[in-house]
Amino acid sequence: QVQLVESGGGLVQAGGSLRLSCAISGRTFSSYAKGWFRQAPGKEREFVAAISSSGGSTTYADSVKGRFTISGDNAKNTVYLQMNSLKPEDTAVYYCAAAYRFRYGLSVRNDRYDYWGQGTQVTVSS
C-alpha cells in the first residue's frame, strides 16, 4: 500500500515562504517520479513541479519558475516543495503525487500519476 502524506501548509503573507513536505511509504522511494499539483477554488487541478525518480531532473510550471524548488531526500522518503516570494494567486490546496507507471520521465499531466496525497492548504494574504 502506497501512502503519501503532505504537511507544511498554512497562512503566509505575500512575499513570504513555506516549505511543503510529502512523506511517501510503500515501494522504494526512488521507484517513483514525484510531482506537486495545486487546485484553487473553482479551478481545475494544475501542475506545479516534478522531479524524476533519480532526482536528477526537475521541471516547473511557468507561473512558479524561479520561485519554487522541488527536491527529494531518499533517506527520509520525502519530497519537498520550497516556495519563496509567494503571491496571493498561489493560494490553493497543494497535492503531492507519485508516478510509478511513468516513473522514467517527468510528467506535467495529472493522469500520469498513480498515487496522491490528501492535500494541504496554502493561503497567501495580500
Image (cartoon, helix red, strand yellow):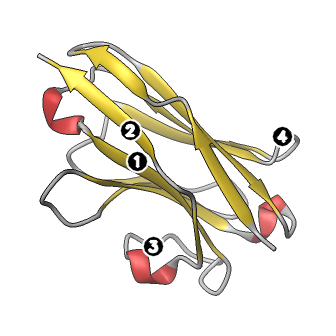
Position of 30 with respect to 49 (left or right) is right
Dot 3 or dot 4, earlier in sequence: 4
User: Mark 2 — residue?
Assistant: 121
Label 4 crowd (10 A; few <14 / some 14-19 / many >=20)? few
Image location of residue 14, percent across then percent down: 20, 16
Circle 3 SS class: loop
User: Mark 1 — residue?
Assistant: 94
User: Mark 4 — residue?
Assistant: 76
Dot 3 or dot 1, earlier in sequence: 1
The correct choice, above or below, for 103 with respect to 58 in the image is below
Mark 3–mark 1 Cα distance, whole angstroms, equals 17 Å
Circle 2 SS class: strand
Residue at 51% across, 59% down: 35
Quarter of the image where one finds residue 92: top left
Residue at 56% across, 75% down: 105
Residue nearest the viewer, comparing 107 with 93? 93
- Residue type of the residue flagged with mark 3: Ser
Position of 102 with respect to 106 (left or right) is right
Label 1 crowd (10 A; few <14 / some 14-19 / many >=20)? many
The correct choice, above or below, for 19 with respect to 16 in the image is below
Which corner quadrant holds the N terminus? Answer: bottom right
User: Mark 3 — residue?
Assistant: 107
Dot 3 or dot 2, earlier in sequence: 3
- Residue type of the residue flagged with mark 4: Lys
Image location of residue 65, percent across then percent down: 30, 41
The correct choice, above or below, for 10 with respect to 119 in the image is above
Label 2 crowd (10 A; few <14 / some 14-19 / many >=20)? some
Mark 4–mark 2 Cα distance, whole angstroms, equals 23 Å
